[in-house]
Image: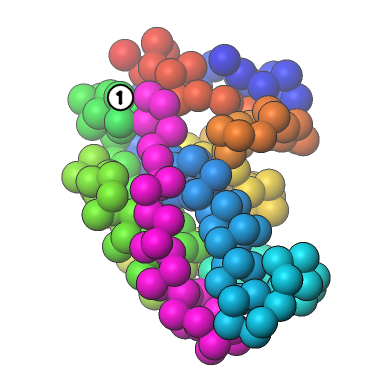
Amino acid sequence: MSSTSHPMRPIRWNEIDSVFLDMDGTLLDLHYDNHFWLEHVPRRYAERLGLSLTEAKELLLPKYRRIQGTLEWYCVDHWSRELGLDVALLKSEVAHLIAVHPRVVDFLEALRDRGKRRVLVTNAHQASIELKFRQTALDGHLDHVICAHDLALAKEAPGFWERVSRVEPFDPRRTLFVDDNLDVLRAARDFGFRWLLAVSAPDSRQPVRDTAEFPGVEDFGALLPGLR
């Protein structure tokens, strides 16, 4: 079912060679990450400093906002140093919440059957990727994984897609890119991507959101009839 925020034109799959996909909020339910940063980290931070949960959140939220959208924001090592916590260990404590969005595997297999290259392009830190692959086995349905930390630039940054093209040559006019981050989609549009989709329900526990100037999709099942 598509979001009402922007009409989705039919995808002409014969004009697409590769599909680039974000991980958190796109292939995976963002509920895990939202719970981790907004509830689990504050709880452990409060325990470490002897604070109330409310006090810990009041300290953490400005720290989050200060670097949001930068590579540091996504970096497990940065937050471990900043907070004096083993963030990778904390992530594993709530790993049972990691979940694949509905129809994602069906979509990835349909792409394979149509001969489309399936590339994960994520800002997530290597430790987060490893944990999530262990929980979901999603890597078995992908042809290539590109981690922004390996390229030393976040997806939001100018120059990111040039660096991607060095490790994964692609034609932006013949590549579909799906992400839940509107700033990332705007950067991709500036680079020349012709086919862009926004995930309108990244967190299954939150309402469907307006995807602004991008066509939105709630569930990858909406893309299957045209693909098959």
- 171 relative position to 112: left or right: right
User: Which quadrant of the structure image shows residue 70?
Assistant: bottom right
Q: Observer-nearest residue: 55 or 99?
A: 55
Q: In the visual, does 217 lie left or right of 221? A: right
Q: Nearer the viewer, residue 86 or 217?
A: 86
The structure residue drawn at horizontal position 25% and vertical position 28%, both measured from the top left corner, is 109
Q: How far across and how far down the image is residue 206, in percent?
A: 66, 34
Q: Amino acid at mark 1?
A: Asp
Note whether 190 is above or below 151 in the view shown. above
Q: Is 89 colored magenta in this rendering?
A: yes
Which region of the structure is painted magenta? 75-104
Front one among 99 and 119: 99
Q: Report the predominant secondary structure element of the magenta stretch.
A: helix
Q: Which color scheme does this rendered protein use? A: rainbow
Residue 8 drawn at (x, y percent): 63, 20
User: Residue 195, located in which quarter of the rendered image?
Assistant: top right
Question: Which residue ends up furthest to the top in the rendered image?
Answer: 225
Residue beneath label 1, please? 106
Badge 1: residue crowd in 10 Å (few <14, some 14–19, many ≥20): some
187 sits left or right of 143 in the view? right
Taking the spot 56% from the left edge, 61% from the top edge, the residue there is 40
Q: Residue at x 68, y 28 (%)?
A: 208
Question: Please, is residue 125 above or below residue 112 in the view?
Answer: below
State which quarter of the image contains the C terminus: top left
Q: Residue at x 69, y 53 (%)?
A: 183
